[in-house]
Image (spheres, grey):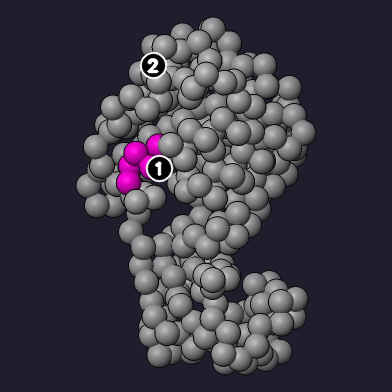
Amino acid sequence: MSAPVFLAEPGSLADARAGALHLLDGAEGRHAGVVQRRSPGERVDVVDGRGVRLECVVEGAQPDGVQLRVQARVEEPAPGVALVLVQALAKGDRDELAIEAATEVGVDAVVPWQAERSVVVWRGERAAKSRARWLGTVRAAAKQSRRAWVPEVGTALDDRGLVARVQETARRGGLTLVLHEEASTPLASVALPAPGAAGEPVELVVVVGPEGGISQREVDALTEAGAVTVRLGPHVLRTSTAGPVALALLAERLGRWS
């Protein structure tokens, strides 16, 4: 069984090396020591959300956290093709279900989209609170799936902002795929972008509409900006499942699961 994962702040593991002691403190330390009652000799991993993983063994608990002995330091490189989910805001918790599953699948970034037919609207204080929930969702899902990378959560885009994102993605050599039930091109047959240079991944963006679907006006604007409409298969999936399914298929094609 894989070791449980605890999150450290990005950059905080820069000096940690094999053989050294590391104090897991703060909320994560309390969770490990008080809630989970991790005991000496147990294996745990500490990650910084940006690819650094410390493989550790618990040495003991103390008032300010859990003392760990670092067994190994692993730096997991960023992928050459970054998977990005643009998820339309949806009622209930369907959009959060989508980004949770997408994180478990391996998405590298999620972006909220205020689509034309989105019932939910992010404005003012609600926008800040809703984005904070998304941040919490992807952090929890990254820990559950034992990831060293925590997906980035973008700020909400309107239609104009999404068009600009599509144009910028194309300019940098990436590709935007819009899931649409009337598209004639299967997702499995689309040519994927070549990996970018080290430290400069290209983006493969998947756009998922709300419960009412993407309007024809939005489809036209996105395709004019360089996006390609694709279909997953013979069935119409919910907004909460379409993105994760598409990302799983793309992850397999990119060799992430082999």
Residue extending farthest to the front is 234
Label 1 sits on a secondary structure element that is helix
Q: Position of residue 111 (x, y in %)?
A: 54, 36
**10 Å crowding of disc 1: few (<14), some (14-19), many (20+):** some
Q: Residue at x 67, y 41 (%)?
A: 96
The quadrant in which residue 116 appears is top right
Q: Which residue is mark 1?
A: 251
Query: Does the magenta segment cover residue 1?
Result: no
Q: Position of residue 7 (x, y in %)?
A: 56, 67
**Residue 61 visible, this orientation:** yes
Q: Is residue 144 above or below residue 211?
A: below
Q: Is residue 84 above or below residue 137?
A: above
- The mark total stands at 2
**Residue 113 visible, this orientation:** no
Q: Position of residue 235 (x, y in %)?
A: 57, 21
Which residue is nearer to you in this view: 34 or 169? Answer: 34
Horizontal side of 32 relative to 86 (left or right) equals: right
Q: Residue at x 43, y 89 (%)?
A: 20
Query: Does the magenta segment cover residue 253?
Result: yes
Q: Residue at x 54, y 81 (%)?
A: 43
Q: Which residue is mark 2?
A: 185
Q: Residue at x 52, y 70 (%)?
A: 2
The magenta span reads 250-255
Q: Quadrant of the N terminus?
A: bottom right
